Image (cartoon, rainbow, N blue to C red):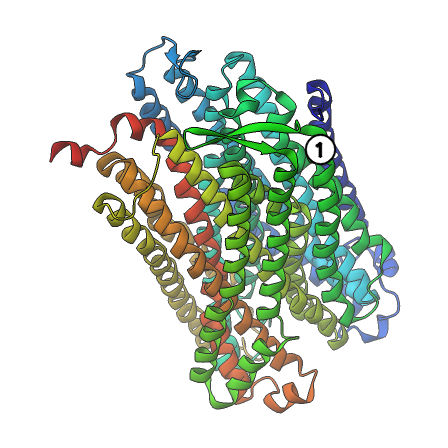
């Protein structure tokens, strides 16, 4: 038969989560063994200073003390920004929780009587009021877990950046392992926490719901909504913060004053380093947690109205959770390949080692999926398919999950090809800098549009196969397959900002050139892996949104979405416009904040005596304040756009228009997001290619400060908001609108379409 006992699945899921948490804490412990001492504690200082003693630019103890001081400034900046941001988000969360409760409670005018089940008409289900209450609780839990994921990731990143710098003195391998372990802490904590909270919520909700699994899993969808709404503000706020500082620091520092990127004389440099942590680490963590929570919720919801839910088969029902549990174990083994089995000895081995992580985790996970599928699922069962029940075999599901997993790998490798300076696309962009910034921009845009083609085909094939085999459940588990190796994906993604910060600290502490070269090599590889992480996030968002869209259509009882009806078509065309409107808001926000930053940095260079000579001290705090204020103020309009669009469409125009809106946003959002992320990544690495000057071709374009280099910096500056603010935030736009529509579907189905009812 092949379905494992309920007791076994009840043990295995939390066990995997605890293993993940324990592994994360072990990595944290190993990172903490690198000591950061202050200048007067010579005993620890001596232990750190090995072969590169004579190379360190200034007295070693001073350099170490300086590292500790800079790390502290970055950590304090990042923590205070996140606390301020979470205060705003706390208010939003409470207000939105009330909205969810009132909207869903009003479906049956707040009655406490049991109601007839939606899908199983012969049964009685719990009242709509209970669903309203439990959905609200799930929303709050999702929001809390999302915030926690981002915050913990940021904490370990700011803890590890200076440690990576100090390890770079012993060699590039040591520094690589420190940065990678720190990324792994975030990856495993996030995956394990997400799984554990979801598992506990389901079991606690079950105490009330009992046999009403339809209501139970419908209310669990609030968990995904909570995760994603926090991620949206984290991504947008963090993205605006980091890019305002980055653009300001680059324009004045590199182009006008001709000083290096992380020069301590540049007032915006601390804000820039803080930004990497709040945008790329805290924002990314919340973002991928949101994807994970939503794909799990979509799969659980569709399963609950299929034979698993009707027959109350708990282990088959928990299949999405068991896949994630298996993913934690697989990623744990994969991580050991980077940190313990193979040692990185030279700069050229960094990128292959990170790419190997993706491949190893994918191959191992394919085997893991096979085991889970044949153990947890019965050989034959039925899946809900828009009103019908489709007969599916367990090996069909194996193919659905696997194709999602391998499509993720294909997207990762395509992204890498288009954004790494080891291949011709980025080198062509670098080459185009010879004739100035304009040609650089033209080449970069073309590269971004080109880079959309293969990921879209990968997503299309994944959707076609999984949908044909197992309807919407197939699409939901394909998204889960893509996210099953999330721990590894996040580890290589968080590695990027950590090594970027490590390079900045080395520059600011006045370390020697050798150390700078090592941290630069770590950073260049990190740029590519960050692009791969964004590719994953966008690809999984497309699949997750489609699965949520299917769940929404089922819940709102829409049999078909007919594009030829005016109701649907207006939704479609407006939905396709939303990613552009959203990008316009976020790009302009970065522009406005960067404008203030540039003026402030110029003012300091002009008015602080001895700043250029290194005798005056820059005022870092003002720049940090500019970034903080701008991001908190500017994250509200784009957030409101995303959250209000489905509510307005569903309430006033009805579920068909809303279905069109979701389809339009999904189709256009994915394309805009991929091209924006890859264009920005390519421009950044073209600039790094010229700066590093490794090949003869790169040397002919350099050195730093040459005209070609300045053109590359301009391209990179334009690409910054594309790759770190607009691009990555768009995947949250498409997911959040879909999950919100699913959560509010009962209300829209009961009371939606007010305008069409009046006219």
Task: Place residue 614 in its image quadrant.
Answer: bottom right
Residue annotated with mark 1? 374
706 versus 153 height, above or below: below
- Left or right: residue 572 versus residue 145 is left
Q: Position of residue 650 (x, y in %)?
A: 28, 36
Name the foreground residue: 82 vs 175. Answer: 175
Q: The C terminus appears in which quarter of the rendering?
A: top left
**Quadrant in the picture for residue 353:** bottom right
Q: How many marks?
A: 1
Q: Taking the image as drawn, is residue 499 in sight?
A: yes
249 vs 321, nearest the viewer: 321
x, y percent for residue 636: 36, 47
Q: Residue at x 55, y 44 (%)?
A: 466
Tell me which residue sits at (36%, 24%) in the image. 101
Whole-percent x and y of residue 233? 44, 46
Residue toward you, 594 or 600:
594
Q: Is residue 221 above or below residue 458?
A: above
Position of 129 compared to 24: left or right?
A: left
Please, is residue 374 above or below residue 85 in the view? above
**Secondary structure beneath label 1:** helix
The N terminus: image quadrant: top right
Depth check: 420 or 691 in front? Answer: 420
Give the quadrant of residue 114. Answer: top left
Graded by Cα atoms within 10 Å as few (under 14), some (14 to 19) or many (20 or more), the crowding at tag 1 reads some
Residue displayed at 46% across by 30% down: 222
Task: Return the x and y of residue 715 as percentages of the image width and height.
Answer: 48, 76
């Amino acid at each position: 038969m092949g379905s494992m006992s309920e007791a076994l699945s009840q043990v295995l899921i939390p066990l995997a989560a605890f293993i993940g948490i324990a592994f994360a804490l072990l990595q944290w412990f190993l990172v903490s063994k690198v000591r950061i001492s202050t200048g007067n504690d010579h005993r620890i200082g001596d232990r750190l200073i090995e072969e590169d003693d004579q190379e360190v630019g200034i007295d070693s103890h001073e350099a170490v003390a300086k590292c500790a001081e800079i790390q502290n400034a970055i950590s304090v900046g990042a923590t205070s920004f996140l606390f301020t941001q979470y205060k705003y988000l706390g208010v939003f969360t409470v207000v939105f929780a009330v909205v969810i409760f009132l909207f869903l409670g009003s479906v049956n005018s707040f009655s406490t009587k049991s109601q007839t089940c939606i899908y199983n008409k012969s049964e009685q289900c719990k009242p709509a009021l209970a669903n309203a209450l439990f959905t609200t609780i799930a929303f709050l839990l999702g929001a809390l877990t999302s915030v926690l994921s981002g915050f913990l990731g940021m904490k370990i990143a700011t803890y590890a950046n200076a440690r990576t710098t100090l390890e770079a003195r012993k060699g590039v391998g040591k520094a690589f392992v420190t940065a990678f372990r720190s990324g792994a802490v975030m990856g495993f904590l996030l995956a394990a926490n997400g799984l554990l909270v979801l598992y506990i919520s389901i079991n606690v909700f079950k105490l009330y719901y009992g046999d009403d699994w339809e209501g139970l899993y419908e209310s669990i969808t609030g968990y995904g909504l909570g995760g994603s709404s926090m991620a949206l503000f984290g991504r947008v706020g963090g993205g605006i913060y980091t890019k305002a500082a980055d653009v300001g620091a680059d324009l004045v520092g590199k182009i006008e004053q001709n000083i290096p990127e992380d020069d301590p004389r540049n007032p915006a440099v601390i804000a820039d380093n803080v930004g990497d942590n709040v945008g790329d680490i805290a924002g990314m963590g919340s973002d991928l947690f949101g994807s994970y929570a939503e794909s799990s919720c979509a799969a659980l919801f569709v399963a609950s109205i299929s034979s698993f839910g009707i027959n109350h088969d708990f282990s088959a029902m928990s299949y999405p959770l068991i896949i994630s549990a298996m993913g934690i174990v697989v990623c744990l083994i994969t991580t050991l390949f980077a940190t313990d089995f193979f040692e990185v000895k030279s700069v050229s081995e960094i990128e292959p080692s990170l790419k190997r992580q993706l491949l190893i985790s994918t191959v191992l996970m394919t085997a893991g999926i096979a085991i889970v599928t044949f153990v947890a699922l019965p050989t034959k069962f039925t899946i809900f398919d828009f009103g019908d029940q489709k007969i599916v075999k367990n090996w069909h599901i194996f193919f659905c999950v696997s194709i999602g997993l391998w499509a993720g790998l294909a997207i990762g490798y395509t992204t890498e090809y288009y954004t790494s300076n080891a291949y011709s696309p980025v080198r062509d962009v670098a080459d185009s800098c010879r004739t100035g910034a304009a040609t650089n921009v033209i080449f970069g845009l073309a590269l971004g549009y080109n880079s959309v083609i293969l990921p879209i085909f990968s997503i299309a094939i994944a959707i076609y196969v999984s949908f044909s085999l197992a309807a919407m459940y197939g699409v939901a588990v394909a998204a889960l397959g893509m996210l099953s190796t999330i721990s590894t994906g996040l580890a290589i993604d968080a590695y990027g900002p950590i090594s970027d910060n490590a390079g900045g600290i080395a520059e600011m502490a006045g370390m020697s050139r050798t150390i700078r070269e090592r941290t630069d090599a770590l950073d260049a590889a990190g740029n590519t892996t960050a692009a791969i992480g964004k590719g994953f996030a966008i690809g999984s968002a497309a699949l997750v949104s489609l699965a949520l869209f299917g769940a929404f259509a089922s819940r709102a009882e829409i049999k078909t979405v007919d594009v030829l009806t005016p109701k649907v078509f207006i939704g479609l065309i407006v939905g396709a416009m939303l990613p552009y409107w959203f990008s316009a808001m976020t790009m302009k926000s970065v522009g406005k904040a960067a404008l203030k930053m540039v003026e402030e940095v110029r003012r300091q260079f002009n008015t602080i005596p001895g700043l250029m000579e290194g005798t005056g001290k820059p005022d870092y705090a003002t720049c940090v304040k500019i970034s903080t204020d701008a991001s908190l103020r500017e994250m509200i309009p784009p957030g409101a756009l995303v959250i209000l669009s489905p509510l307005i469409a569903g309430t006033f125009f009805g579920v068909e228009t809303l279905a069109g809106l979701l389809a339009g946003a999904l189709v256009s959002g994915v394309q805009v997001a991929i091209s924006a992320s890859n264009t920005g990544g390519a421009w950044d690495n073209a600039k790094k290619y010229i700066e590093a000057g490794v090949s003869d071709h790169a040397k002919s374009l350099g050195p730093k400060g040459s005209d070609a280099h300045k053109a590359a910096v301009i391209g990179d500056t334009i690409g910054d908001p594309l790759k770190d603010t607009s691009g990555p935030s768009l995947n949250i736009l498409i997911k959040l609108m879909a999950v919100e529509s699913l959560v509010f579907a009962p209300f829209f189905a009961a009371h939606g379409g007010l305008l069409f009812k009046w006219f």
